[in-house]
Image (cartoon, rainbow, N blue to C red):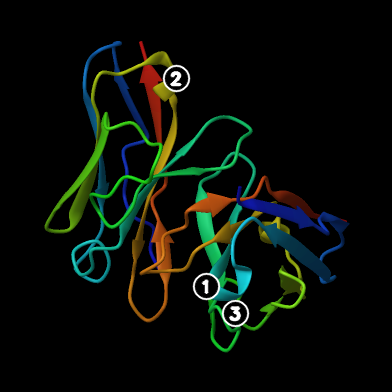
Amino acid sequence: EVQLLESGGGLVQPGGSLRLSCAASGFTFSSSSMTWGRQAPGKGLEWVSSISDTGGTTYYADSVRGRFTLSRDNSKNTLYLQMNSLRADDTAVYYCVKGGVSTTPLAYWGQGSLVTVSS
Amino acid sequence: QSALTQPPSASGSPGQSVTISCTGTSSDVGGYNYVSWFQQHPGKAPKLMIYGVTNRPSGVPDRFSGSKSGNTASLTVSGLQAEDEADYYCSSYAGRSNLVFGGGTKLTVL
């Protein structure tokens, strides 16, 4: 059974930093593209960033490019999202997702981790 | 990266069929066969219902079907059941390694 467990969310002040982690199990992590999506309170889904199976290629939404960094450790089956220069509009539930932007669908979603940016 | 356009709401009675549209441009929906649909119940994570425009993942009832014509994709739910009441989101590859979602449609089973 595919399991994706996010951690690292919480309350942070504007301009601050936070690192989300996603522990994956139940599939061959090193062979899978991975993605982070987010959903602001009461709003729709938004794609944030994706990474190739090897970690050699990363893709970012315009809204987070230059502030967020996506990485992975295939030896630990873990995905990371480093979030810097956080803004109020980054407040959202962040989902770890198995899949990528095109050929591999976003097939499995974690339960999400809430990030709140507020002073 | 403009969001795809979905109607805010849709509804139908049990047993009826309902279709939800997802309109984009030739740079996303119309340009690629990488349209997906997701179901989200309140407080829950999204669930993949359709991928590659028409494909159903294992375990998704065949009451759910997808199609595309030009720049508009559609999700049809046949034989509506109470458990189908949820928010539905479409997504599409938008070129240059970008992914875009629709604004979501709240489906109500009357």
Taking B58 as reference, is A51 above or below it? below
The answer for how far apart the CA atoms under marks 1 and 3 are is 6 Å
Tag on residue A65? Answer: 3
Element type where label 3 sits in the image:
loop
Dividing the picture into quadrants, the one containing residue B7 is top left
Q: Amino acid at mark 1?
A: Ala
Residue found at the very far bottom of the displayed protein: A56
Q: Position of residue B58 (x, y in %)?
A: 38, 43
Q: Residues within 10 Å of mark 2 (few under 14, many from 20)?
A: few
Relative height, residue B60 to residue A66 (above, below) = above
Name the spot of residue B4 as percent of width and height, x first: 33, 55
Residue A91 is marked as: none
Q: Position of residue B76 (x, y in %)?
A: 23, 34
Q: Amino acid at mark 3?
A: Arg
10 Å crowding of disc 3: few (<14), some (14-19), many (20+): few
Amino acid tagged 2: Glu
* Quadrant in the picture for the C terminus of chain A: bottom right
Which chain letter matches label 3?
A
Disc 2 target residue = B83
Given contact means CB atoms under 8 Å apart, are the residues at marks 1 and 3 in contact?
yes
Can residue A118 be seen?
A: no
Q: As rendered, which of B56 and A11 lies closer to the eye?
A: B56
**What is the chain letter for disc 2?**
B
Residue A60, picture quadrant: bottom right
Which residue is more in the foreground, B77 or B103?
B77
Q: Which residue is mark 1?
A: A61
Q: CA distance from mark 2 to mark 3?
A: 38 Å
